[in-house]
Image (cartoon, helix red, strand yellow):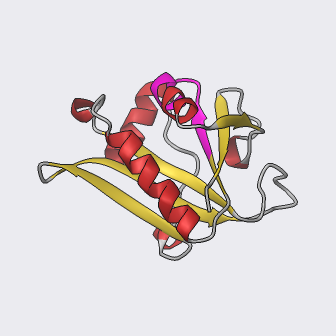
């Protein structure tokens, strides 16, 4: 997570403004995954259950929010991010979540390409970044 925050600092000049509580990712209302390549941790990703919030109309009951997607620079381009994403989508759907939502930024074109080629579509900005012009939010229905 320190390397992820350092990456955000390189790309955006600051860290992530949405700290998370590890308890958010406890099953059955969340999951945090670490992907390994030959026994070396190279990728992370997580989801947590979120529901409708009158103060945040982009969120719906049954949503799962994707968080902390990251692949070590030396391991990029080998399908690790897509494998973690698919595993997280399946786990969220198995937990009864109906839609995956996520926030990324315009400084991460590779992440945006991953999400778009994985069936995600732009949606209204939400959360701490809903008024940030650099923010890009996406959503995808999850198969039951």
Quarter holding the C terminus is bottom right
Magenta extent: 102-112
Q: With respect to residue 131, does 60 lie above or below? A: below
Q: Quadrant of residue 63?
A: bottom right
Q: With respect to residue 82, does 34 lie above or below? A: below
Residue positioned most to the front: 144
Query: Residue 99, how many percent across, how many down?
Result: 67, 55
Can residue 10 be seen here?
yes
Judged left or right of residue 5, residue 39 is: left
Residue nearer the viewer, 95 or 4? 95
Marker count (numbered): 0
Picture residue at 45% right of the left edge, 35% below the top: 8
Query: Residue 33, how many percent across, how many down?
Result: 37, 59
Query: Residue 61, how many percent across, how many down?
Result: 77, 65
Question: Is 106 one of the magenta-colored residues?
Answer: yes
Judged left or right of residue 32, residue 137 is: right
Judged left or right of residue 97, residue 16 is: left
Picture residue at 87% right of the left edge, 60% below the top: 54
Question: Is 10 one of the magenta-colored residues?
Answer: no
Q: With respect to residue 9, does 57 lie above or below? A: below
Query: Residue 118, how many percent across, how many down?
Result: 53, 37
């Amino acid at each position: 997570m320190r390397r992820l925050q350092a990456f955000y600092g390189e790309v955006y000049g600051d860290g992530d403004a949405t700290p998370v509580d590890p308890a958010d990712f406890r099953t059955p209302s969340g999951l945090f995954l670490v992907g390994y390549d030959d026994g070396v941790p190279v990728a992370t990703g997580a989801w947590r259950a979120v529901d409708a919030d009158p103060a945040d109309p982009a969120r719906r009951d049954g949503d799962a929010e994707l968080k902390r997607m990251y692949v070590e620079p030396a391991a990029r381009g080998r399908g690790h991010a897509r494998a973690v994403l698919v595993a997280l989508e399946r786990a969220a759907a198995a937990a009864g979540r109906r839609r995956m939502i996520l926030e990324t930024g315009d400084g991460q074109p590779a992440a945006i390409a991953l999400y778009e080629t994985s069936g995600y579509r732009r949606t209204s900005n939400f959360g701490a970044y809903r008024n940030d012009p650099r923010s890009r939010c996406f959503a995808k229905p999850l198969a039951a």
